[in-house]
Image: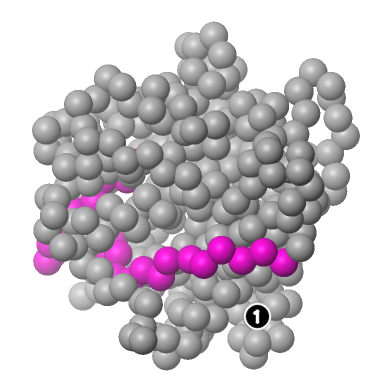
Amino acid sequence: MGSAVIKLNSEILCAASAVGKQEYEGPLGTLFDLHCEDDRFGQDTWEKAESEMQRQCLGVALSKSGLREADIGALFAGDLINQCTGSSYGLLDYDIPYFGLYGACSTAIEGLMLSSIMTTTGIFDHCASVTSSHNCSAERQFRTPLEYGAQRAPTSQWTVTGSGLFITRSALQGSGKAKITEALPGISVEKGVTDMTNMGAAMAPAALDTLVRYFTESGSEPNDFDLIVTGDLGFEGNSILRDLLSIEGYETDERLTDCGMLIYDRNGQDMHAGGSGCGCSAVVLASYLLPKVELREINNMLILGTGALMSPDSIKQGLAIPGIAHLLRIESERS
């Protein structure tokens, strides 16, 4: 059996992001393309607001890239609402072939991975991938109605209201864009965690599995990278992952971080263990990390989309929560 690491030659032509009030008030607020003070984006339900974020992000990305709908060969999209209705309704206005995805909070990286494979192999010239989450739609689907005002556990994370979209193409020499050079698909890992208020604990073993497989198969180590960032383990899951990696003989120091730790001000905003949701890694990558790669402030990074593959029915049945972690290697165009 050969290595599962996929060699890619794709680049992110452009990205777009839209967020809600809490995200805009966080440390990355000025970097997002769009924001809405009431989290509704002109809609009368939270679910429609999530669809609208995706619709607007695609419009912004097409404008940035100078492309038309007809130039996009395929669109990979997903969200947390049952059957990905946020994506399917939000993208109805666009005449682009559509693939619906569900990878929970790993969806942003899963979609970007599939887009990169399609453009690397020349199946499509350009692909787009988009995902979203909304705090209000996610909370009332997975936990309790917002009106209950239930007390949140210290290990709980705040579902990000946000959407991130990426357009990929085959990598061009001298373009200055962020290059996607490797991918490693995740394997579902379940370690008996049933607490839906501690998703970091459920996802950390999957992140460990993917990272150890990647380091083993690629022959690399943590210090070969400027940054290793996970999707949304938050502070709790990040701490668990550090401990698990140390047991395996990998020390990561400050180069290991998490999108759920970056998007909010832990001291100034009461988000407990940090951010989560499909939109978390999507908006942090689109607005904060990619510009750093293009400016060569980050030359070589790994990003893992981590997801808790639960559903309302699995929670009701008391099933343990499987985790998943998809990995991409993103590099700058070095001189």
Q: Residue 27, image x and y in percent? A: 59, 44
Please identify the quarter of the rendering in which residue 91 is found: top left
Residue 56 vertical position relative to residue 190 in the rendered view, above or below: above
User: Is residue 103 left or right of 297 when viewed as pictured?
Assistant: right
Q: How many marks?
A: 1
Q: Residue 140, image x and y in percent? A: 70, 27
Which residue is tagged 1? 245
Question: Which of the two residues, 335 or 168, is positioned nearer the viewer here?
Answer: 168
Q: Measuring 65% from the left and 26% from the top, which residue is drawn there?
A: 136
Indicate how the structure is coloured in the image.
one colour
Residue 218 vertical position relative to residue 132 in the rendered view, above or below: below
Tell me the magenta residue range.
165-191
Any magenta on residue 177?
Answer: yes
SS under mark 1: helix
Q: Residue 250, image x and y in percent? A: 61, 86
Q: Measuring 60% from the left and 51% from the top, which residue is drawn there?
A: 309
Q: Quadrant of the N terminus?
A: bottom left
User: Is residue 149 left or right of 133 when viewed as pictured?
Assistant: right
Question: Which of the two residues, 16 or 185, is positioned nearer the viewer here?
Answer: 185
Q: Measuring 16% from the left and 63% from the top, which residue is drawn there?
A: 121
Q: Tell me if I can see residue 330 in this picture.
A: yes
| Residue type at the position of mark 1 | Leu
Q: Residue 77, image x and y in percent? A: 38, 39
